[in-house]
Amino acid sequence: MMMNDEVVKTQETAATEVVAEVNPAPAEKRAGGFNREGREGGRDGHDRRPGGKRPFNKNKRHDEDDGLIKKTVSINRVTKVVKGGRTMRFSALVVVGDGKGKVGVGMGKAGEVPQAIEKATQQAKRSMSEISLLGSTIPHEIIGKFGKGHVLLLPAEAGTGVIAGGPVRSVLEACGVKDIRTKSYGSNNPINCVKATYEGLKSLRTAQQIAALRGKAVDEL
């Protein structure tokens, strides 16, 4: 009887092994890593290897596709005293230009730095103005003024480069000026310097524009 029982158990064990080979257990996937078969997979089941297809995210923003030059000049922390205590916010100054003669300046405030920069960028885009340039420089000398800030802008020959301080340089590079000399007077506050430079650039006029305003030919000026 014991011999027969051992034979029956051996047959049952062999049958169980055959069933296991015919119906293998599905490979378990690990979140964000590799499954037990060695294939790479993410949480959503998509292939994450180079060249693999990824789902299209229609909410993804592509700010670099607009072709604009964005420069964050300064970020300040602003504290306001209210009845319940103090509230802290951030103020951002941003310059936006296309590098081809258009530039704008904007300021934004928000509770977080990214939101403040985004608000300032949108305002700068709305305030973009066409600047009259002469090749890679400006057509004539001019002084831009804003508050206590004064910025002198001087045309320069090709190859000079942009000779300017940080805030002034940001405006000129975003505008597309390649050769210029500048000098700042009075306040060195970044807001005053940037807006004084912006006002000076907006006041530039080419010889053709001045002749058209006066109703004369360029040779008669």
Image (cartoon, rainbow, N blue to C red):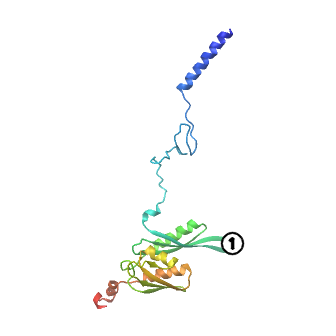
Task: Check the image and report above or below for 55 versus 137.
Answer: above
Task: Check the image and report above or below for 61 versus 150.
Answer: above
Across and down, in percent, residue 172 comes to: 45, 77
Across and down, in percent, residue 108 comes to: 55, 72
Q: Residue at x 29, y 87 (%)?
A: 218
Disc 1: CA contacts within 10 A as few (<14), some (14-19) or many (>=20): few
Residue 128 appears anywhere in the view:
no
Image quadrant containing the N terminus: top right
Mark 1 = which residue? 86
Across and down, in percent, residue 121 comes to: 50, 70
Q: Is residue 3 left or right of residue 173?
A: right
Residue 45 appears anywhere in the view:
yes
As drawn, which residue projects farthest toward the front?
Answer: 159
Dot 1 falls on a residue whose secondary structure is: strand
Residue 7 placement: quadrant: top right
Image quadrant containing the C terminus: bottom left
Nearest to the observer: residue 59 or residue 218:
218
Across and down, in percent, residue 168 comes to: 49, 78
As drawn, which residue projects farthest toward the right?
Answer: 84
The amino acid type of the residue labelled 1 equals Arg
Q: Residue at x 46, y 75 (%)?
A: 104
